[in-house]
Image (tube, rainbow, N blue to C red):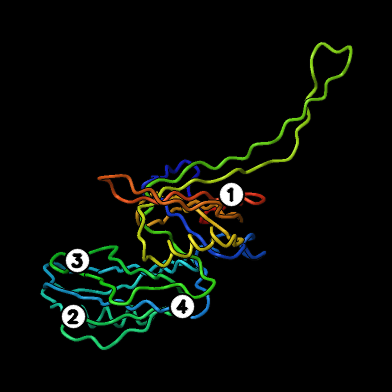
Amino acid sequence: MANISTKFVTSFSELYFRPSTLLTSELADPKTWFAATGSGATAKIMTVTVTGSASATGTLVVRTTNPVTGVIDSALVSVTSADSATVVGAALKTALGLNADLTTGTASAGVFSATALAAAGDVSIATEDAIAGITVTVTTPTPFVAGSGGTLLIPNVMEIGSLSNEATVIDTPTFGEAFKGKLRGQLDAGQLDAQLYWAPRNSTHLAMRSAATVGTACSFGIKWKTDAAGADAEYVVFDGFLSSFGIDTSFDDVAKASSTMVVNGALTFSDNG
């Protein structure tokens, strides 16, 4: 669970969108909404490349993060000084192959493939504890793509606006009293405005524009992270509508898209706990 005193860096925030409303189970555990892969998702394929030669003895630790379950798994490889990239790569391939989310291919000269289950979403692999002289690089020839009904990370976000709950206040004047009385009415979560750098052929931007045009009931979410890795994160999800998706083509400037997400109902907050 994130420390209550943790500071979150807004530049690492992520904005998500799905052209369908929240499920009851997702309201109970909002993290699952962010990781919903949908049907027919494209599995992520990564290429892991080990280069160099170990100049120290120790343990190489490579972290695998499953965004669907939030589970972080560490692959441990014992390295002896002067071990080659071929030796370390073969050992790392075996260690990562023990992760139920991954299928690893044959290691050759320190290079091998790691294919994630489509249901595991956008799995990431990163070095946690390195060994001097050894470099582990992960590239993605086939990125994860959410399937039909999956939650989509909105790319090219320039700015995200504010979310707040505001209640209607009703005056109840009473004759003979010096001051008016007040009653608290219904809460209104308002709307969230977002500015995007417009990518005309991006599938997520196209889906947002379509949802705004057709009037699709959608769901939205923000993930606040302490750093790029997102070991600590806070979440908010809500149902709503894209009431607008406008394109700004100011002269001598990058093209932008303005979107307004009107909240329908309550905001649901959660954390990594």
Image quadrant of residue 98?
bottom left
Disc 4 element: loop
Residue type at the position of mark 1? Val
* Quadrant containing the C terminus in the rendered view: bottom right
The first of marks 1 and 4 along the sequence is: 4
Residue beneath disc 3: 131
The first of marks 1 and 3 along the sequence is: 3
Report if the CB atoms under discs 1 and 4 are less than 8 Å apart.
no
Give neighbour class at mark 2: few <14, some 14-19, many 20+ (Cα, 10 Å): many
Residue type at the position of mark 2? Gly
> Which residue is drawn at the image coordinates 43% and 80% (left, top)?
117
Residue type at the position of mark 4? Ala
Query: Is residue 97 in sight in this rendering?
Result: yes
Q: CA distance from mark 1 to mark 4?
A: 28 Å
Residue 17 locus on image (x, y percent): 50, 60
Residue type at the position of mark 3? Ile
The first of marks 2 and 1 along the sequence is: 2
Report if the CB atoms under discs 3 and 4 are less than 8 Å apart.
no
Is 107 above or below relative to 255? below
Q: Nearer the viewer, mark 1 or mark 3?
A: 1
Image quadrant of residue 180?
top right
Query: Is residue 29 in sight in this rendering?
Result: no
Picture disc at residue 41: 4
Residue 197 locus on image (x, y percent): 35, 52
Q: CA distance from mark 3 to mark 4?
A: 35 Å
Disc 3 element: loop
Q: CA distance from mark 4 to mark 2?
A: 29 Å
Residue beneath disc 2: 110
